[in-house]
């Protein structure tokens, strides 16, 4: 499973009011064990979680949720709104982590994407999460 597409709000004055993330998961996967966490990065300090994780199983509805047609019917596309998904001017880089909670109580980061609307990705040498569900990734 992975993040296939996302849209972040590029500024406070943007016409777009909400950020969103599109995730591909196996069709029969239980969304109760999946979370999205947003991160912000500053220079060499690493990434800090930006608010509480969005637990997919706790959402009452998605923007889009469907199983793909054959021959890809083993996959499901889920699109969810993530209000904290924005390009924050006070930070150098931002990120999105996709985290799975396993039956044995452990968790696994299945995808971690970093982005910037400022073109300064090379100025952040440490893109490791230093807290939150993706800590150490």
Image (spheres, rainbow, N blue to C red):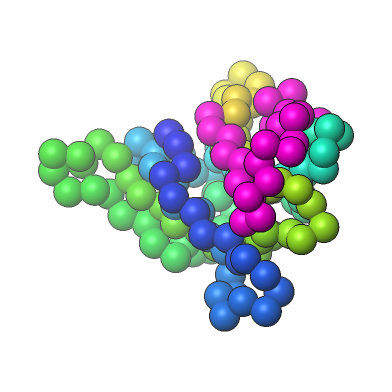
Tell me where residue 132 sits by quadrant.
top right
The residue closer to the viewer here, 57 or 118, is: 118
* Residue 129 at least partly seen: no
Q: Which residues are magenta?
A: 110-137
> Percent position (x, y) of residue 81?
55, 62
Residue in view at x 13 percent, y 39 percent: 71
Tell me where residue 104 sits by quadrant.
top right
In the depicted structure, whether residue 127 falls above or below residue 52: above
The residue closer to the viewer here, 61 or 99, is: 99
Residue in view at x 61 percent, y 76 percent: 14
Residue in view at x 57 percent, y 80 percent: 15
Question: Is residue 131 on the magenta stretch?
Answer: yes
> Percent position (x, y) of residue 82?
60, 60
Number of disc labels: 0
Q: Main secondary structure of the magenta part?
A: loop
Quadrant in the picture for the N terminus? top left
Quadrant in the picture for the C terminus? top right
**83 left or right of 59 in image:** right
> Percent position (x, y) of residue 12?
71, 74
In the depicted structure, whether residue 30 falls above or below residue 118: above
**33 left or right of 134 in image:** left
Q: Residue furthest top?
A: 104
Residue in view at x 53 percent, y 29 percent: 110
* Residue 52 at least partly seen: yes
> Percent position (x, y) of residue 95?
65, 44
Q: Residue furthest left?
A: 70
């Amino acid at each position: 499973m992975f993040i296939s597409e996302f849209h972040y709000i590029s500024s406070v004055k943007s016409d777009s009011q909400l950020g969103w993330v599109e995730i591909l998961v196996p069709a029969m996967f239980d969304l109760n064990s999946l979370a999205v966490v947003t991160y912000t990065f500053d220079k060499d300090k690493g990434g800090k979680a930006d608010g509480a994780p969005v637990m997919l199983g706790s959402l009452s509805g998605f923007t889009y949720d469907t199983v793909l047609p054959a021959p890809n019917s083993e996959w499901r596309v889920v699109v969810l709104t993530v209000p904290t998904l924005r390009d924050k001017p006070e930070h150098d880089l931002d990120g999105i982590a996709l985290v799975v909670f396993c039956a044995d109580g452990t968790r696994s980061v299945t995808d971690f994407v970093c982005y910037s609307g400022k073109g300064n990705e090379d100025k952040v040498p440490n893109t490791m999460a230093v807290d939150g569900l993706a800590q150490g990734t």
